[in-house]
Image (cartoon, grey):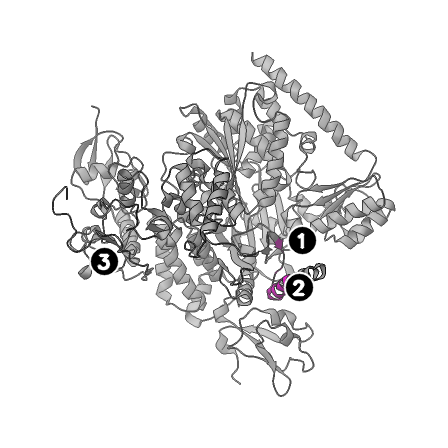
Amino acid sequence: MKVIKQTTAAAAFHEIKERAESHWRELWHDKPVIMVGTATCGRAAGAPDVLQAFRDEVKKRKLDCPVIEVGCMGHCYAEPIVIISKPGYPPICYGYVNPVIAERLVKEFILGDNPCPEFVIGALEANDLLPSFDDFPRAQHEQKIILKNCGHIDPTEIEHYIAGGGYNALAKTLGTKPEDIVEEVKRSGLRGRGGAGFPVGRKWQYCREAPGRTKYIICNADEGDPGAFMDRSILESDPHSVIEGMIIAGYAIGARYGYIYIRAEYPLAVERIQIALKQAKKLNLLGNHILGSSFNFDIILFHGSGAFVCGEATALAASIEGKPGTPRPKPPRMTAAGLFGKPTVVNNVKTLAFIPLIIRNGTEWFTGTGTKNSPGTAVFALAGKIVNTGLVEVPMGTTLRQIIFEVGSGIPKGKKFKAVQIGGPSGGCLPESALDLPVDFDSLQEVGAIMGSGGMVVLDEDDCMVEIARYFLEFTQRESCGKCTFCRLGTKQMLEVLNDFTMGKGAMEDIDSLERLAGEVKAGSLCGLGQTAPNPILTTLRYFRDEYEAHIELGKCPALMCQHLIAYYILPDKCERSCDACVGSCTVEAISPNKKRIKVIDQTQCVKCGTCLAACPPQYNAIVKLSPPSEVPAK
Amino acid sequence: MKTVSLTIDGKKITARPGEKLLRVALENSIYIPNLCAIRDKPEPSASCRLCFVEIEGGEEPVTACTIDVTEGMVVNTRGEKALALVRAGFELLMASHALDCAHCPANGNCELQKIARHLKASLKTKRLRLLLRELPIDDSNPLFTYDPNKCVLCGRCVWVCRQNIKSGVFGFAHRGFERVMTTFADEPIGADRCLDCSQCVEVCPTGALSFKEGKRPSTEDG
Amino acid sequence: MTASKQETTTEEREQIKQETGQILNGFSRKRPGLIPILQKVQGKLGYLPREAMTAIAEYLDIPAIDVYGVVTFYNQFRLNPPGRHSIKVCLGTVCHMKGGYITLDAWKRRLGISPRETTDDREFDLDTVACVGCCTMAPVTVVDDKPEGVVEPTRVDGILLAFGYERETKDKEKSESD
């Protein structure tokens, strides 16, 4: 019986795979291919116009040159990004492309033989002509496993995914006993990538062994951490990896239905998942009797309606049930009584994307990367004051310093590193002294942060640590569901105190009472949101207490960020009489020349937007920020 | 029937397995502060966060309303760690409660006053700031008045309202600090859907729902 | 956010009921349908008027307050008709640290409204969004569902100018075709 099933599934898949591979070969056969990255980050930077320019140009010149859309390669700093693969050349990646450059690339590279090195970021393969990505310092640390396909395949073409080995794991799974799949995932030591790092295999086992016939698998794609976009990028760039992971999970735990709970703020990801589901269904990789086996499985797409707390599993389930997303106390665990009261596994997007790879390549392959207790790779969304913003994937155990300074190329404009914020509103701010920490689930917890789902925001000397704590509290306070006392009222109390601090109000004792309240909210709250909400306060107090003290004692924001504690001032001896740049730039007409034609800011009108400072020509550099505002000399 | 024995504050107690610790304590005349616990409701809401106790062998205090009693359990309702949390939760509630006992119909019959006595805590918090919302008072119902500024969001009225009317009048709306016990579209309660059974007033632990002058039923079936 | 205080005419109410009814027919009468129903109705009507909420409650046989509770819980749902253009300022961590709050101030100043409000002429909605995941383009403002990168106060004026310009040219085209 078992054997027959296996051959059916394997045979059915073999046919699909053959076809996909032949289509893939055809695409690349003896002709150039232009790939334009059109994930959200690319679109925001103008990728649609670039795509259109390539298409127009290719059409105008009647070229046999497919122009395809791909996802995000991770080099978001250089969007719009285009890869051109031309026979006789290595595939070449271009950055900051615009329609004019697009036209030139067609004219000079596709038609001619000039690869236009001035627009090249790097070649994808080592070669004698151009520098390749492998030559960059970051290549030494980067190891793309779940981001491998991102930016290299068309996410709306299932055959691209299959040609690269996709759905092999599913075919293999269908010929294996579900409990063996659970065992395999357990042995891999894979830990949940949503933040807490719970062992995935154990979760699956609890659910599989829970009594009852109806079970659910939910993919948590409600990526709500401000400053995190890893899941969005994977869903937009390689949706089938997540879908395949879900089908395998469904098979392993014995679920008939799965839900993808996806943020409404990610319209493109929704669209691409919808296309992917349709395609998978068409090839019988989803639906009834998958690949001729006796396994039936369907995926329902659920659009989250905007509530950060729904990232919490019980709140997420309540939301699917048609209720407000308020968490409930645990136990019972989700794996015992989850969605509609049935045993349910909730896994993060990245977690599920790892599954097909583990099944396909085996646990030894997986545990070969990363650390003993945190195997595999970690995906981070690098953002903030860092040169190479974008997505990076590095083995667990890579240090923060390596990620920020070698992969991310450090801080722009020669500024000084101050802190790195990891884990979003639930995480913490770590100082320079923590930079040599190898990043994994356990080490980050020791220093007061959490792995979170992978947002990493780098802060420099211009960023105020009191303000960042205030910012996160404002966020958690706004996103608190309001059910339990500590989170509803405690976050509000803490926010009020921090608001005062950023305005220079408050007393030194308030710092201690804030710290005490933070501890109480952490211990007293019902769910993870409230329990971790104080982390940004606790870590900034731990590592940057002096900044708090400066705000309160001196009314001074050392980073010159807090608007109430700074003033913009035009240095009279530096201001150039003939220049009016600042006057024109001011959004509220607060700047005017005095009798000597030296420009003066009317402090009562100034809204402190900083536009004038940016407008002042660098050769004069006459505008400065002062803190406290009383530093501005009287007339 | 099978029973389990446990110790709460040194007192030996037998209980049915699977029962919640809070319920067992209260039935044995051991008071643990609570607001959101509802006897017949199967799932604890665990939202008021006032029933923290310490259990021997456990590191952190836990809410008694969510814990099943087990054989040999040793519970301390007076542990310093637990009481510190209870006090903090209580202070948070009081900092957002329109405090005016002298003019409050619930004066003398108020759970908040009872909890304050139990904790030997002041009703007025000193270390937190007052965060009041100044929501409009609804006196549209002929029998009772609803003052949301005194509401602690325990959910007792919402629960009882749904036991009596299939399509309940009360529910929670909005989120976070704005969360409020209210009616559809924040309409006056006095409108057509309420049956005036006034059981919501009976279960309210504070003065948020209170009878109007002379409207308190004098007999049990009043 | 409170329920729509705007007066609707009997005709409008009838139309709301009819359109809501049409959408409801495509759903089973089960509670888990609530959020997808609300999304679809709002997609059609632009907001969730009182009549739509009561019709949904009736259809699903749940208390009307439960519909109201869900609508007011989630950021996505609105109780008032939207403006013609939507301006959403991203306040993700990176956008905030790179001056998103200053951009928000600029929008507030120029439009004369606060987040979650609509201008009197119903042209613009102003709102904030937690993070649209375009952190590399910070500060971001999403204008009519299109994320615009590096929106600083001067760019705010530029975007508004473009709308003014667009309106003018449309008017012109109209007058020309008349």
Q: Chain of mark 2?
A: C
Amino acid type at mark 3: Leu
**Label 2: how many residues lie within 10 Å, few (<14), some (14-19) or many (20+)?**
few
Amino acid type at mark 2: Glu
Name the image quarter holding residue A420: bottom right
In the picture of the structure, the residue carrying the numbered disc 2 is C168
In the picture of the structure, the residue carrying the numbered disc 3 is B123
Q: Position of residue A112 (x, y in %)?
A: 88, 46
In the visual, does A506 lie left or right of A181? left
- The magenta segment: C147-167
Report the quarter where the N terminus of chain A lies: top right
User: Viewer-proximal residue, C136 or A452?
Assistant: C136
SS at circle 2: helix
**Residue A414 can be seen, yes or no:** no
Please tell me whether residue A206 is drawn above or below residue B126 in the rendered image: above
Disc 3 vs disc 2: which is toward the camera? 2
In the picture of the structure, the residue carrying the numbered disc 1 is A45
Residue at the image point whose x is 61% and y is 72% from the top: A612
- Give the main secondary structure, helix, strand or loop, of the magenta stretch: helix
Q: CA distance from mark 1 to mark 3?
A: 56 Å
Q: Chain of mark 1?
A: A
